[in-house]
Amino acid sequence: MKDVKKIRDWNAWIRRGVLLAMVGAAVMLACGKTQPVASDPPEVTPEPVYADERTARERAFETDAQALERLTQSEDEAVRQQAARQLEILVKEHQAELAIEEALQQSGMETAFVIAMNGSVTVALFSEQAAEKNSAMILALCMAHADVGAENVRIMSASP
């Protein structure tokens, strides 16, 4: 019986380690910026339209992830398991947001802002024509990256 408990404890530590690695990777993706080579001319990148919203989202993600990480250290097994599940969901949703935004940027829609939460995805675009013209592509990206059904994807036009 003690061996089974040791194996379960070991598996729990492995899951925590993998989860921490996932959180670390998400943070690196979200915050990672490459430094230009000295010989490269400096690039002037326009400030993304939704920079404030993205910054707020990243702060909220960090705060939530830290709170859940603290709960994974709880003495109560049920609390630890629930916190680990919630942290895993949080990281998955955050990775989906970043992947969809990156895919949209690569396709020329740099003004997209994505929120993935509770099994649904909302994509906000500045251009109404972009939303109408690219809705099928946006829908396909959301379904692929966030693993949600079409009925759980919202595409909306927003004003700055």
Image: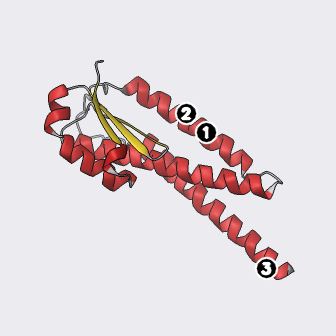
What amino acid is at disc 2? Ala
Q: Earlier in the sequence, mark 2 or mark 3?
A: 3
- Residue at the (50%, 45%) spot, across then down: 27
As measured in the structure, the alpha-carbon distance from the residue carrying label 3 to the one carrying label 1 is 32 Å
As measured in the structure, the alpha-carbon distance from the residue carrying label 2 to the one carrying label 1 is 6 Å
- The residue carrying mark 1 is 64
State left or right for residue 97 relative to residue 140.
Answer: right
User: Is disc 1 placed on a helix, strand or loop?
Assistant: helix
Relative image position of residue 159 (x, y in whole percent): 28, 19
User: Camera-side residue: 125 or 110?
Assistant: 125
Q: Earlier in the sequence, mark 3 or mark 1?
A: 3
Say which mark, if any, is on residue 51.
none
User: Is disc 3 placed on a helix, strand or loop?
Assistant: helix
| Quadrant where the C terminus is found in the figure | top left
- The residue carrying mark 2 is 60
Say which mark, if any, is on residue 4.
3
| Quadrant where the N terminus is found in the figure | bottom right
Foreground mark, 2 or 3? 3
- Residue at the (19%, 26%) spot, across then down: 128
State left or right for residue 69 relative to residue 23.
Answer: right
Quadrant of residue 154 in the image?
top left
Question: Is 51 placed above or below 106 here?
Answer: above
What amino acid is at disc 1? Asp
